[in-house]
Amino acid sequence: MKTYRFLLAGLGNIGRNLLEILHTKQKILRDEYSVNLIPTVLADSSGVLSESHQNEIDLMAVINAKKAKRGVATLPHGNANISVLEALSHNPIDVVLDATPVNLETGGVGLELTRLALEKGVHVVTANKGPLALCYQELAAMSDFDDASKPGLRFSGAVGGAMPTINVGRSDLAAAHINRVEAVLNGTTQVILEMMASGSSYDEAIQEAIHLGIAETDPTLDVEGWDAANKLVIVTNAVLRQKATLNDVSVTGINTLRADEVRAVRMLGERMSLLATAEWMGDHYKLSVAPVPLADSHPFARLAGDEMAIRYETDIYGTQTLITTEHGPIPSAAAMLRDFLDIHRNSHH
Ligand SMILES: NC(=O)c1ccc[n+]([C@@H]2O[C@H](COP(=O)([O-])OP(=O)(O)OC[C@H]3O[C@@H](n4cnc5c(N)ncnc54)[C@H](OP(=O)(O)O)[C@@H]3O)[C@@H](O)[C@H]2O)c1
């Protein structure tokens, strides 16, 4: 049995669901994987809750508190005066699980936490695309991507939820040359485009998507294409092994489209989608995110709003197409468990 003491930062949609998964899968993790996961630090925007000899963390109590919209600092032994970075420095942590919000300007607390953990030799699993989109090469060089003796870094939940985008690209297409990648990596824009094709104006579609809880109150990152571009940057670095940042991606959002254009495409039997593309140009990949009309025969033409997809065109494995259907955040939270188990398997060997 191997024991891992974990720090989980972020107890929102992803973090709270991850805690529930860890709670319900405890027996399988012990019996089938010989893994014992001990919650040692849990952090949200209110502060931290740390385990000690006198205080074992009661996962169900934390899950219930978060469901009731309470911060962990309000729980017995919670602390509003310690940052998650200080908690990482002062506690014996084996793995950091990052489910904090995306910050594309500074990388936010997720970037600081990931850097500090890797510096300390602590494994990191993250669902947060921000640090990877901004600093992929720096973080990869600090991790087992560079040298197997360094701490593990995994982020499969950051690109397409539970769709094994990164894992298939890195492991299952071994030694392939990938000629082209096409992907639909943003569900919000799919839903908005579908509403526009069915008669709504751009503004009406956005308001409806916000009302349904599908879009953020500020959906700029989605509709202007930056969310998809971030994910493409991560795929380019991690799978295509080309150094890339957001500056290398030509980005056009769906906010440039008029509803009558989207409907005209539909009248032709095609479907407008925000497509992320990496195309091999002979010596580098050309990266773009743009609304593209897809012919009815295209495998992405019938994706529903809760589906995302990626296609790898390769030299030796043919074309591999992945489609994921996900309702809510549980599959993305589960991707963090999958990533942790991958680190466990590797460090075990
Ligand atoms: N939702 C999805 O379906 C999905 C899918 C794939 C990837 N992701 C990524 O996963 C991450 C989390 O998403 P989410 O939907 O769970 O977001 P969320 O519901 O907004 O939760 C964010 C959590 O981070 C906490 N937090 C904020 N600042 C913090 C700080 N300085 N230190 C510690 N915790 C802090 C918040 O605290 P409070 O609880 O106190 O507000 C909250 O618990 C994001 O990076 C997102 O892009 C999400």
Image (cartoon, grey):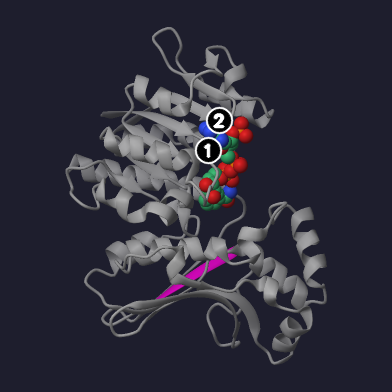
Query: Residue, x 29% and y 66% (percent of image)?
Result: 241
The boundaries of the magenta stretch are 307-312
Q: Is residue 26 left or right of residue 260?
A: left
Residue 305 appears in the figure: no
Return the residue at label 2.
Answer: 44
| Residue sitting nearer the eye, 313 or 323 | 313
- Image quadrant in which you'd find residue 187: bottom right
The answer to whether mark 2 is within 8 Å of ligand 1 is yes
Image quadrant where one finds the C terminus:
top left
State the residue at coordinates (51%, 28%).
Answer: 43
Q: Is mark 1 within 8 Å of ligand 1?
A: yes
Residues at circles 2 and 1 in contact by the CB criterion of under 8 Å: yes
Q: Position of residue 264 (x, y in %)?
A: 74, 88
Q: Is residue 325 left or right of residue 2?
A: right
Figure quarter occupied by ligand 1: top right
- Residue reaching furthest top? 54
Which mark is in front, 2 or 1?
2
Give the image location of residue 279, x and y in percent.
40, 80
Q: Nearer the viewer, residue 119 or 349?
A: 119
SS class of the residue under badge 1?
helix
Image height check: is 102 above or below 109?
below
Label 2: which secondary element = strand
The residue to which callout 1 is attached is 15
What is the chief secondary structure element of the magenta stretch? strand
Is residue 70 among what the camera can see? yes
